[in-house]
Image (tube, rainbow, N blue to C red):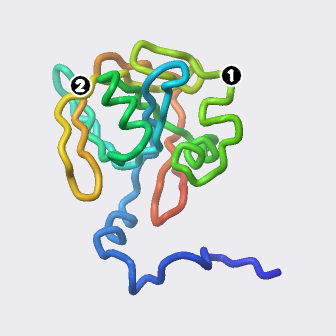
């Protein structure tokens, strides 16, 4: 058995999109976007998000228009953006569709339902958002949302995504 330092199934560098390679060189904070309630809950790992200060504040993000998350957010007009930390790697992979989720994405009993959607655990930094302008942008949707409420949990280092891997601040 051979252990590879790289993904043996990855697309060779010469065949990858230059835009995707540029984006991969930009470290991004990993967030979890969730919407809906009960059986209609859905979520998506998002690392292409920007917070814009103002009165009110806004969030801009790129999401997959065919995702279950987007269907739920579009239906409710609301979602929760939760910051993820270094201990959330498996949670991020689960909601990115990179890890199996037997029992469903929301199988754990620590989810707390807010008026904007489900939040993973009680002591998280998250923002309840209302969907505003949405338009096709690149291969996804550019979602502009108003931040309705902010819950500041215990300050923790962010989980970062850089060059296809999770990273931590050091």
When asked about the image quadrant of residue 5, the answer is: bottom right
Q: Secondary structure at mark 1?
A: loop
Left or right: where 119 falls relative to 143 = right
First in sequence: mark 1 or mark 2?
A: 1
Q: CA distance from mark 1 to mark 2?
A: 29 Å
Q: Which disc, if any, is residue 137? A: none
Nearest to the observer: residue 89 or residue 103 = 103
Q: Residue at x 51, y 48 (%)?
A: 96
Viewport quadrant of the N terminus: bottom right
* Residue 143 falls left or right of residue 123: left
Q: Judge whether 31 appears above or below 19 on screen.
A: above
Seen as rendered, the residue at the extreme bottom is: 14
Residue 157, given in percent of the width and then of the height, sits at 52, 40
Picture disc at residue 109: 1
Estimate how packed mark 1 is, as few (under 14), some (14 to 19) or many (20 or more) residues with alpha carbons within 10 Å: few
Instruction: Determine the residue positioned at 55% across, 45% down.
Output: 92
Taking 56 as reference, is 105 above or below it?
Answer: below
Q: Is residue 48 above or below residue 127?
A: below
- Residue placed most toward the observer, 76 or 34: 76
- Residue that appears at 49% across and 64% down: 164
SS for callout 2: strand
Circle 2 residue: 146
Label 2, residues with CA under 10 Å away: few <14, some 14-19, many ≥20: many
């Amino acid at each position: 058995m051979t252990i590879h330092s790289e993904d043996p199934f990855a697309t060779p560098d010469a065949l990858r999109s230059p835009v995707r390679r540029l984006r991969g060189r930009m470290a991004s904070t990993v967030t979890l976007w969730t919407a809906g309630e009960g059986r209609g809950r859905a979520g998506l790992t998002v690392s292409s998000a920007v917070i814009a200060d103002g009165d009110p504040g806004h969030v801009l993000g790129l999401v997959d228009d065919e995702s279950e998350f987007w269907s739920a957010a579009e239906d409710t007009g609301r979602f929760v953006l939760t910051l993820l930390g270094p201990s959330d790697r498996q949670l991020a992979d689960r909601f990115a569709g990179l890890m199996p989720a037997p029992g469903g994405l929301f199988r754990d009993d620590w989810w707390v339902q807010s008026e904007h959607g489900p939040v993973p655990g009680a002591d998280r930094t998250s923002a309840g958002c209302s969907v505003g302008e949405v338009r096709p942008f690149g291969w996804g949707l550019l979602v502009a949302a108003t931040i309705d409420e902010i819950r500041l949990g215990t300050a923790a280092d962010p989980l970062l995504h850089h060059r296809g891997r999770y990273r931590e601040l050091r």
